[in-house]
Image (cartoon, grey):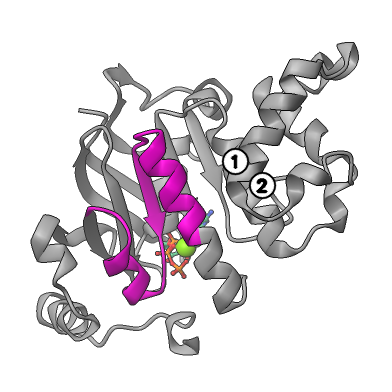
Amino acid sequence: MMLSIKQVYKTFNPGTVNEKKALSNLNLELEKGDFVTIIGGNGAGKSTMLNMIAGVYPIDRGSIILDGVDISRKPEHSRAWLLGRVFQDPMMGTASDMEIQENLAMAFRRGRRRGLGWGIKKDEKALYREKLRILDLGLEDRMTAKVGLLSGGQRQALTLLMATLQDPKLLLLDEHTAALDPKTAKKVLAITQEIVASKNLTAMMVTHNMKDAIAYGNRLIMMHEGRIIYDVAGEEKKNLKVADLLEKFETVSGEEFANDRMLLN
Ligand SMILES: Nc1ncnc2c1ncn2[C@@H]1O[C@H](COP(=O)(O)OP(=O)(O)OP(=O)(O)O)[C@@H](O)[C@H]1O
Ligand SMILES: [Mg+2]
């Protein structure tokens, strides 16, 4: 098993008027190679789940085991090298003032900017060129261009490449295509699928797009009030329709599905 989340609880601002139970008895097990899509309404706990895995905040209770290692109480920096992360904001994953090849070299050295002092070797450049070619965005011919010049979609594709350069145990994607136009989003999703499949990565992808949640990955989970209320895989997942998901949500939660970003498409 690659990931095991057991009875995880997280309450923000406990004992205050702003108290918020973000995760409440969260349980999830992922096998190596699982590509799970995650849907749920606003505030369901999707981002919090990913943040807890990454160690952004400590969990209140429970355990998180990644590839046999208990990371529940490890600080964020000591788990970072096990994980790849891509966020919604294309500005977040890359350094604008640095070249494409320098960004890749940083990822290759797992964020140690200092390591760049010796320069980027020829065979390393060849490796980056080959990786960039897979994106099919023409970036292999612009390796010395500053990342700040790239479009949002190009930056997300590059961030994805950087996040997976060193084969993370788990790839965490939090609405990483939500800020892109539909055509670019589709392209970045195709790249995501290609990278996950070719490296047999284990991945979790939050999306507000139910069609994408059905189309990508081998498993789909739905969250509500800090826990998983629906978990489906294989053929059953493939055959789902958006209407099935909405109905499922309404049956289990007794509420109407509400996600502000979902209403936009
Ligand atoms: N750092 C924080 N401090 C306080 N409350 C937080 C924090 N992070 C999340 N929350 C709260 O925890 C709950 C879950 O938030 P989370 O961001 O995980 O939801 P989400 O499912 O990702 O929603 P969305 O679809 O809007 O991104 C929300 O009520 C949110 O306000
Ligand atoms: Mg979120």
Q: Amino acid at mark 1?
A: Leu
Q: Secondary structure at mark 1?
A: helix
- Image-quadrant location for residue 60: top left
Q: Position of residue 133 (x, y in %)?
A: 65, 43
* Disc 2 Cβ-to-ligand 2 distance below 8 Å: no
Q: Residue at x 36, y 69 (%)?
A: 212
What span is in magenta?
189-218
Q: Position of residue 194 (x, y in %)?
A: 44, 48
Q: Secondary structure at mark 2?
A: helix
Residue 58 visible in rendering: no
Of 250 and 125, the residue lying toward us: 125
Of 142 and 2, the residue lying toward us: 142
Q: Amino acid at mark 2?
A: Leu
Task: Specify whether residue 194 is painted magenta.
Answer: yes
Q: Residue at x 20, y 86 (%)?
A: 243
Position of residue 41 in the picture relative to residue 102 (left or right)? left
Q: Residue at x 54, y 24 (%)?
A: 81
Disc 2 to disc 1: CB gap under 8 Å? yes
Q: Residue at x 17, y 66 (%)?
A: 238
What residue sits right under mark 2 in the picture?
Answer: 158
What residue sits right under mark 1 in the picture?
Answer: 161
239 in relation to 1, above or below: below
Of 184 and 29, the residue lying toward us: 184
Q: Position of residue 262 (x, y in %)?
A: 43, 81
